[in-house]
Image: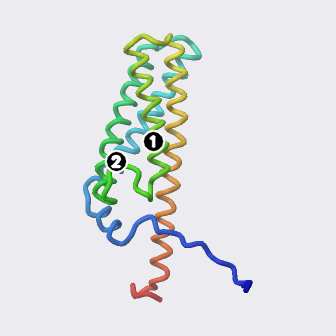
Amino acid sequence: MHSDTPRTPVVRPLYTPQERQRRDATVWTLVQGVLAPVQFLIFAVSLVLVLRFLLTGEGQGAATASVVVKTLALYAIMVTGCIWEKVVFGRYLFAPAFYWEDVFSMAVLALHTAYLLALWLGWLTPQGLMLLALAAYAAYVINAAQFLLKLRAARLQQSGEALARGPSGAAA
């Protein structure tokens, strides 16, 4: 028998009530909240330095140092993010709620690590290194956008739940 009633897909909430409670209770949420904008600021400064070097040939040392600092900040946010994910979701990586963000994070990490290896082992010219840094930075921007969209979805979900509960806090 055919029904004309449209089926709405079942959407798993980003956080279960228990996961949300763990997220809100752990210090690692604050750590991530601090490290993310710090890393973005480092990225922005480094991007300017890398582009300056590529366009003018000046400031190679500053550009190189900035990419190393950006990579170290990435490692810090990745390690603490894994701890956060373990506390909230019970696994260090690839929790269903952040699976694709984690997958792409591995590509970002690989590109940044490739930069460090190429720098330390002399595999690329200075221009080649900076182009590799730009590739890593492009991947980082995509990954940051993934996380921002996920956080926005979580906020919208939480707002929707609050509206559904009504002013008394009970389910409407």
Report crowding for label 1: few under 14, some 14 to 19, many 20 or more residues within 10 A (C-alpha). Answer: many
Identify the residue position indicated by label 2 in the image. 81
Identify the residue position indicated by label 1 in the image. 105
Which disc number belongs to residue 68?
none
How far apart, in angstroms, are the residues tagged by discs 2 and 1? 11 Å
The amino acid pointed to by label 1 is Ser
Residue 107 higher or lower than 51, as above or below: below
Residue 132 higher or lower than 148, as above or below: above
Residue 157 higher or lower than 40, as above or below: below
Q: Residue at x 32, y 61 (%)?
A: 23
State the image coordinates of residue 132 (x, y, percent, origin top left): 52, 23
Q: Is residue 136 left or right of residue 76?
A: right
Asked if labels 1 and 2 touch by Cβ distance under 8 angstroms, the answer is yes
Q: How many marks?
A: 2
State the image coordinates of residue 129 (x, y, percent, origin top left): 49, 18
Q: Is residue 77 left or right of residue 45?
A: left
State the image coordinates of residue 89 (x, y, percent, origin top left): 34, 59
